[in-house]
Image: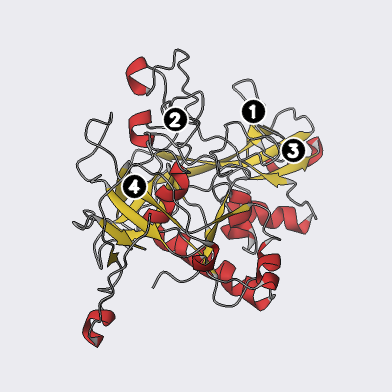
Amino acid sequence: MRLKVVHFFFSFSCAFFNCCSETEVSGSLDTKPYSPFSSELDLKIKQNDIQKLSQFKSFVRIHPGEFTMGSPRGEPGRGEDENPHKVVLTKPFWIGKFEVTKREWNQNLPFSLKRGHPVFSLKSRTIQKLCKEGEFIDGNYAIQEYEKVISNGKIQKSFFLEESYPNFGTIGNWAIGGKNRKSYAINSIKFSSLSEITKYFAQNKISAIGRIGQMNPITHISYSQATAFCWNKSTLAHSLGKLPKGMFFRLPTEAEWEYVCRAGTLGFSGLGSGERLSGVNACLNGSRPEYVLGGEPMLINRKVVSPINPNSPRYPPNAWGVYDMHGNVMEWCQDFYGQYSSKSAVINPLGPFNGSRRVVRGGSFYRTAHDCRSASRMSYEPSYRGSEIGFRMVIGYPVL
């Protein structure tokens, strides 16, 4: 299929307000899910730049192409903001195989800003100095903070050492033990804050051996925090000569996200044939028959995020080798949220020029299959930091 591109010339004021974020393409919608351009239309990337990018083993190269974005009328769970339209992506990009983990987030951050409760290997004599009277056992313990509202309405904080176990779900992923775990209250008179506890450890040369949930996707992240993380990572990578000139870590556009999620499929799912989505092939709430799509007889709801295990992923990838595009955590996208363009087809769409909410895609472990479909759209204020929200990175060219 040949596409006739209609070019427009805009005034400076239009360009200033990003009015040329999408270009109309003639032609009607068809059923072809993916039609790659000829190699000369795939931006000519220098061979040494491709070699640089090959060091990022956790990223997949995505070639330019076209697909139908949105959903057809009658698709189960369809929203009114999923108007189907042809999208053409003209630039290659690389996308993370997995969502960003707490371990990645914690790199290059000071101890006080790292996510996940620190875990220490402690002897009973050390625990005795930290805690109230009692008998103590050597082991691995995480510092856990609890809050309680007392009679005058003030919040009282208390700290406990909670027995913890390694390799939960995947190697290196620490988790606090079950209900039979050892739990010791730290003496609040001697240690009234977390900083005092960690200072004591530093003075006695006791280092953390891990953190709780390090291989879980990072969550409670705002849009602004996600974009700042990408920017800082880009700055560091360029300073070390690891990224080609003109390429950056960033969030995917909404169109890029759905293009990769579908991976050439036409159904409501980007996995397999595209006609099945449940707790069997994705980390979502598939606890009831009406919560799944495709008639899956096995009903599963794990109720928590799934750890990222690159060596042995729990769920299958899509046809392009990308994992967890359905469920697990919602993923921030670059775009402001709004109705799709009324044009039948667009090139490199960027969404509205302004707005108050940003797009999130993919659903989460908490949502049903209907909210985790390839075309499903949600949005939040950029400052929102929810327990279901994380992100996935792209290495690509600037979107503007």
Q: Amino acid at mark 3?
A: Gln
Q: Nearer the viewer, residue 389 or 376?
A: 376
Which callout, 4 or 3, points at the residue further toward the start of the chain? Answer: 4
* Image location (x, y in percent) of residue 146: 50, 40
Q: Nearer the viewer, residue 67 or 368?
A: 67
Which callout, 1 or 2, points at the residue further toward the start of the chain? Answer: 1
User: Which residue lies under the disc numbered 2?
Assistant: 284
Q: Residues within 10 Å of mark 4 (few under 14, many from 20)?
A: many
Q: Relative to 385, is 229 above or below?
A: below
User: Which residue lies under the disc numbered 4?
Assistant: 68
Q: Amino acid at mark 2?
A: Leu
Task: Please tell me whether mark 4 or mark 1 is closer to you in this view.
Answer: 4
User: Which residue lies under the disc numbered 3?
Assistant: 128
Marks 1/2: CA–CA distance? 24 Å
Which label belongs to residue 177?
A: 1
Q: Amino acid at mark 1?
A: Gly
